[in-house]
Amino acid sequence: MYPTVVTRNPTAVQAEVETAYLVIFPHADLAFVGRFFDWAIDCFSGKHRDYQAVDARYHDFEHTLQGVLCLTRLLRGRHLANAQPRLNERMFQLALAAILFHDTGYLKKRDDIEGTGAKYTLTHVQRSAEFTAQFLQEKGFGATDIQAVQNMISCTGVNATLEAITFQSELERIAGSCLATADLLGQMAAEDYVDKLPVLFSEFAEAALYTKDQTSFVASFSSAEDLIRKTPDFWRKIVRVKLDRDFSGVHIFLNDPYPAGPNPYFERIEANLARLRERL
């Protein structure tokens, strides 16, 4: 069983990332981890010159850190399982950058005073990719690295189609699958996931009102209770299918012990769904 980490605490999550990083790459450049955590914290806390602090209540910075923690554990498990192709240090770094910035699309410009960043739910993946590309370019990253990060970010989102993404390598595709897997599992396994579902509905409702698109996924729920009732099927019919088919079942590297042990994230999600059913 994985140790408990307080995902509201960026320092605690960063320490877990650094520990896993050194397991995979004993001579790794830990300065990269600290640098990207600092950059992400600045962006989400309103210290970016052009953007406000995140004000989406479900897709906040803790949501990002839940994904970061899960991705780190997954990549560490994949390394210890000796899975091929082996993850190189640069791809680990780019995957970390991608997961830390994958929801920057919820950030609002300084002069954007209407509503919250949740209104960008339907476009947040593309906005995140664009934000990150500009940010990394300003930090001196090359075009190949920027494209890799954008491709990994594009793997996230309910409607992501990996076949439409032009990956530059098989390793990049695997890293993107790991990232998207961690994004889903990290949030659904969170201790307060059930309690935050009404908040998620409020984000969906704001996005539906903003886009005026009544055919979209976010407009398919009539109320918070409706979203809660449909969550078990969302897990069983949509998330599990994407995890197993689209993302090639990389979640197996979270099994403890590998390969036949239980998946702690799956266990927590099932416990959350059991609590949800009791409430209903």
Image (cartoon, helix red, strand yellow):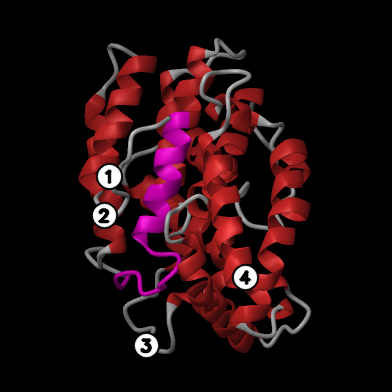
> How many marks do you count on the picture?
4
Residue 119 location (% of width, % of height): 53, 79
- Distance CA(mark 3)–CA(mark 2): 21 Å
Residue 250 location (% of width, % of height): 63, 30
Of 184 and 259, the residue lying toward us: 259
Q: Which residue is mark 4?
A: 122
Residue beneath the point at 52% across and 77% down: 198
Quadrant assignment, res 175: top right
Q: Marks 3 and 2: which is nearer the front?
A: 2
Residue beneath the point at 75% across and 84% down: 214
State the SS at label 1. Answer: helix
- Distance CA(mark 2)–CA(mark 1): 6 Å
Q: Which residue is mark 3?
A: 113
Q: Residues within 10 Å of mark 2 (few under 14, many from 20)?
A: some
Q: Which residue is mark 1?
A: 37
Residue beneath the point at 76% across and 45% down: 241
State the SS at label 4. Answer: helix
State the SS at label 3. Answer: loop
Q: Amino acid at mark 2?
A: Ile
Residue 82 location (% of width, % of height): 55, 10
Kindly check if marks 3 and 2 are in contact, taking CB atoms under 8 A apart as contact. no
For marks 3 and 2 on the same chain, the one whose residue lies earlier in the sequence: 2
State the SS at label 2. Answer: helix
Q: Which residue is mark 2?
A: 41
Q: Marks 3 and 1: which is nearer the front?
A: 1
